[in-house]
Amino acid sequence: MAVLVTGGAGYIGSHAVAALLEKGEEVVIVDNLYQGHRDAVLGGKLYEGDLRDADFLGKVFQENDIDGVIHFAANSLVGESMKDPGKYYHNNVYGTLCLLEQMQKAGVSRIVFSSTAATYGEPERVPIDEYDRTLPTNTYGETKLAMEKMIRWFEVAHGIKFVSLRYFNAAGAHASGRIGEDHQPETHLVPLVLQVALGQREQISVFGDDYATEDGTCIRDYIHVSDLADAHILALERLRKGGESAIYNLGSGNGYSVKQVIEVSRKVTGHSISAKIEPRRAGDPAVLIASSQRARNELGWSPKREKLEDIVTSAWDWHRSHPNGYEK
Ligand code: UDP
């Protein structure tokens, strides 16, 4: 039996593929390689193609004995989603519909879904738990919430069981040094700050210092990408054992402001890292911090690399050894 990983050549997907391979799982990967990288796939069988191509995806299900899906393939940039919502509805929502239809056709009834804290929007309280209100402030979060709900209705009608994992801010890189974060264009805070340290960028823009937080900059909960990867394996195990569908937050429970991330990065890299205050970015909530108690209790998950300094150090190791990402 094989696990199908959609988006397995992307940042988080490639770390999940690595974790599955380490467990001895047979892995099939589908990725259209728009954002993903062939070199990020450390093993398994890679099919290059798009979820929205029914003939292509049908063939993947026909050729492999798939017993579960881990679904990462999606666009995931808050800023871009506010400028081009149609792209997000098409790739994320319609792409998920195509996947679910093929799963139903092939009789595959387990899916672990890559969701996001952006489904909550501006939280009513922190830390956020899974029963809290979901009112996304950006199109990206709205499409992820729509995807979660779609999967839920496929459960009702067709018995597809799911675990939806709502990640907070993924950062860091694999301990092997072989895979890490490489987005084109890069928009995430940690890699951008490290690009300044590498001399690839003059300064880091701080998007707003007038939020209702202690230093005025946004607070996020940073979680190591390999800790996220581990949670997907535990979620799959839960479904294989016949566990009920569930939604879990994944975060460290610690919040760091943008200014604190820059400060920690200065310490880790030994570079001064120049920063400039810019206007707020559309769609950004002030504070996002997870309560991951449920994942800890029910999945037996716990993050192993919790300190921001360790997360930034692992990212720094990757960026230093791959200053141009996967590009040779
Ligand atoms: N951010 C920033 N400057 C940048 C990129 C990000 O100030 O160049 C801020 C962003 O506004 C947010 C936090 O850093 O408050 C984390 O943003 P990121 O894009 O890394 O992740 P997101 O929270 O959008 O998933």
Image (cartoon, grey):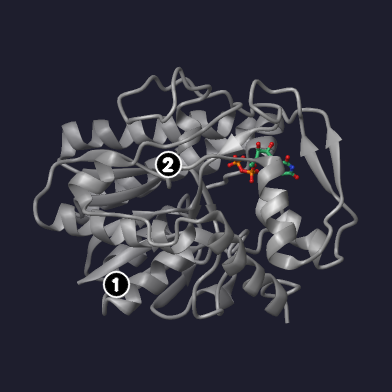
Q: Amino acid at mark 1?
A: Glu
In this view, 7 is above or below 179:
above
Percent coordinates x, y for residue 40 in the rendering: 54, 73
Ligand 1 contact, mark 2 (Cβ < 8 Å) = no
Q: Nearer the viewer, residue 221 or 72?
A: 221
Q: Nearer the viewer, mark 2 or mark 1?
A: 2
- Secondary structure of residue under mark 1: helix
- Mark linked to residue 276: none
Q: Residue at x 73, y 31 (%)?
A: 281
Visible residue check, residue 185: no
3D distance between C-alphas at marks 2 and 1:
42 Å
Furthest toward the right, the residue is 202
Q: Tell me if mark 1 has few (under 14), some (14-19) or many (20+) residues whose alpha carbon lies within 10 angstroms of its own.
A: few
Residue 306: horizontal and vertical position, in percent?
A: 45, 56
From this view, report whether residue 271 is shown above or below residue 77. Answer: below
Would you say 36 lies left or right of 226 here?
right
Secondary structure of the residue carrying numbered label 2: loop
**Residue shown at the point (67%, 30%) measured from the top left:** 82
Q: Position of residue 226 (x, y in %)?
A: 43, 64
Characterize the local packing of mark 2: few (<14), some (14-19) or many (20 or more) Cα atoms within 10 angstroms: many
Specify the label residue 253 is tagged with: 2
Residue type, label 2: Gly
- Whether residue 290 can be seen here: yes
Q: Which residue is mark 1?
A: 63
Q: Position of residue 18 (x, y in %)?
A: 41, 73
